[in-house]
Image (cartoon, helix red, strand yellow):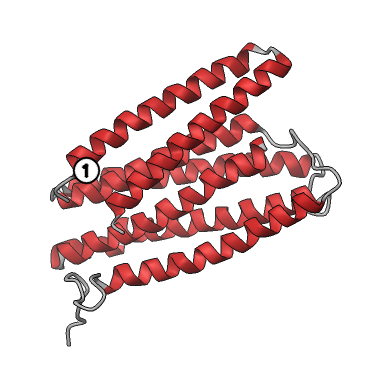
Amino acid sequence: MSLRAFHLLFIAVSVMLTVFFAVWAAAQYNVAHHAGFAVTGVASLACGVALTVYGTAFQRKTRRF
Amino acid sequence: MDIPYIVETRPDTGLANGKLGIWLFLASEVMLFGALFSTYIILRVGAPEWPHGELNVWLGAGNTVILISSSVTMVMAWASLKMKDWGKHRLYLMLTVGLALFFLVNKYFEYAEHVRMHELPSHSTFFAIYFTLTGLHGLHILGGVVVMLYFLGPGAKMWKANPDQFTNRIEYTGLYWHFVDLVWIFLFPVLYLL
């Protein structure tokens, strides 16, 4: 496996982590009703979207490597 | 005598020798960390109760962002070499080293806080496995920093003599670095969230 392929795999796993972290933050918010957890959840999902956009762009731009 | 298959692929494996070597090494690393993760699962399943909220989630999340960013800069360092842009390669590799050191500084403060609270490995099973897993991971980060500093220093000479071999070496370093980052992607939820 090349570094390019491993990087794409790594980004995919990182996106899964951001979703998991957002779910964890939502669960904490349901218990504690602390706004910080809600912000964390939204920020984590935003990071997930940013990583998805980055991964797609990386995949397209490095196709010839 | 020239060493064969350092740049071109070997017909029988379909890989350059260095890539085969780094993947064999990473396979041994999977076994090392796999054994420790298994130990964690066995200890946790067998424990009558397991502590929650012992670690600073925000520091852990910050370190996760740092390592994901460092994987991006690492792959950019390699991609820059593919595009023959030596200046950008140096910049991205230095950024990767900087992010790795930032991670280690954060880890130091996290450890210092636990030591101050007398939360040492002898304190509980949780802290024993926490220090073992994160300590070993931290040593791997340190190892990666040493390798990258070598390629920023004396190892950089190879770029002029054999650019393709140098590019391959940076790719192998990147594979190792991504593996170390991937271990943290699993460590963070397991230790800090669950």
> Residue B77 at x, y = what percent?
27, 47
The secondary structure type at the circle numbered 1 is helix
Question: In the image, is residue B132 above or below residue B110?
Answer: below
Asked whether B121 or A34 is in front, the reply is A34
> Is any part of residue B114 visible from this angle?
yes
Question: In the image, is residue A46 above or below residue B150?
Answer: above
Q: Is residue B55 left or right of residue B49?
A: left
Residue under numbered circle 1: B88
> Residue A40 at x, y = what percent?
55, 21
Q: Is residue B54 left or right of residue A20?
A: right
Q: Residue at x 42, y 28 (%)?
A: A48
Identified by mark 1, the residue type is Lys
Q: Residue at x 81, y 53 (%)?
A: B46
Name the residue furthest bottom: B1
Crowd band around label 1 with a 10 angstrom C-alpha radius: few (<14), some (14–19), many (20+): some
> Is any part of residue B95 visible from this angle?
no
Name the residue furthest right: B48
Q: Is residue B114 left or right of residue B35?
A: right
User: From the image, which quarter does the N terminus of chain A lie in?
Assistant: bottom left
> Residue A57 at x, y = what percent?
24, 34
> Residue B22 at x, y = what percent?
37, 67
Query: In the picture, residue B11 is in which quadrant?
Result: bottom left
Q: Residue at x 58, y 26 (%)?
A: A23
Asked whether A16 or B133 is in front, the reply is A16
Question: In the image, is residue B87 above or below residue B37?
Answer: above
